[in-house]
Amino acid sequence: MTLGDSWGTVFTDEIAEGVSLILIQTQKGEDLITGLNAFLTDVDIERAINANTQLQEPARMSPSRSMFLNAVKNEGSFRIATLRAFPQIVIKRWVKRLLFKVNLYRPGGGID
């Protein structure tokens, strides 16, 4: 089973809430999905593949991956490993969280 955001979807009214794409590849996946209490519908698979580059080829491995895995192994801390491997992303999130706490930032709305 492949899960992801459904880019290029025809469900334009639902975009704000998010539309997920589920590609079922086995009977076991079909059985699992059938039991969900969710709105499911078939989509044009070619359109889905054309709009989702991750379905066209595997993602490239991040150069920071080995640094992250080594930090998890050596430090035993996911937070420290994340900070060491992806400092810019972590610091940006810290700043956003701080700005949100002091009411200067709204997710999706930018800075006041």
Image (cartoon, rainbow, N blue to C red):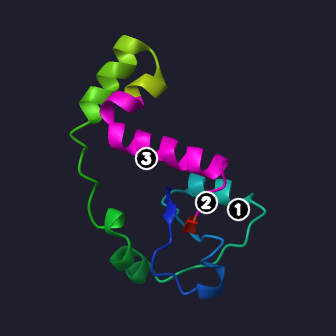
Q: Amino acid at mark 2?
A: Glu
Mark seen at residue 77: none
How many numbered circles are shown? 3
**Mark 3 residue element:** helix
- The residue sitting at the right extreme is 37
Q: Earlier in the sequence, mark 3 or mark 2?
A: 2
- Residue 46 image position (x, y, % from top left): 38, 81
Q: Which residue is mark 1?
A: 34
- Residue 27 image position (x, y, % from top left): 57, 57
The span from disc 3 to disc 1 (Cα, nearest Å) is: 40 Å
Q: Which residue is mark 2?
A: 30
Q: Which residues are magenta?
A: 82-107
**Mark 2 residue element:** helix
99 drawn magenta: yes
Q: Amino acid at mark 3?
A: Lys
- Residue 59 image position (x, y, % from top left): 28, 54
Mark seen at residue 92: 3
72 drawn magenta: no
Query: CB atoms at circles 3 and 2 under 8 Å apart?
Result: no
Front-most of 61 and 82? 82
> Looking at the rendering, which quadrant does residue 81 occupy?
top left
Q: Magenta stretch: dominant SS?
A: helix
> Which of label 3 and label 1 is nearer to you?
3
- Residue 33 image position (x, y, % from top left): 66, 59
> Which of label 3 and label 2 is nearer to you?
3
Query: CB atoms at circles 1 and 2 under 8 Å apart?
Result: yes
- Residue located at (72% from left, 72% from top): 39
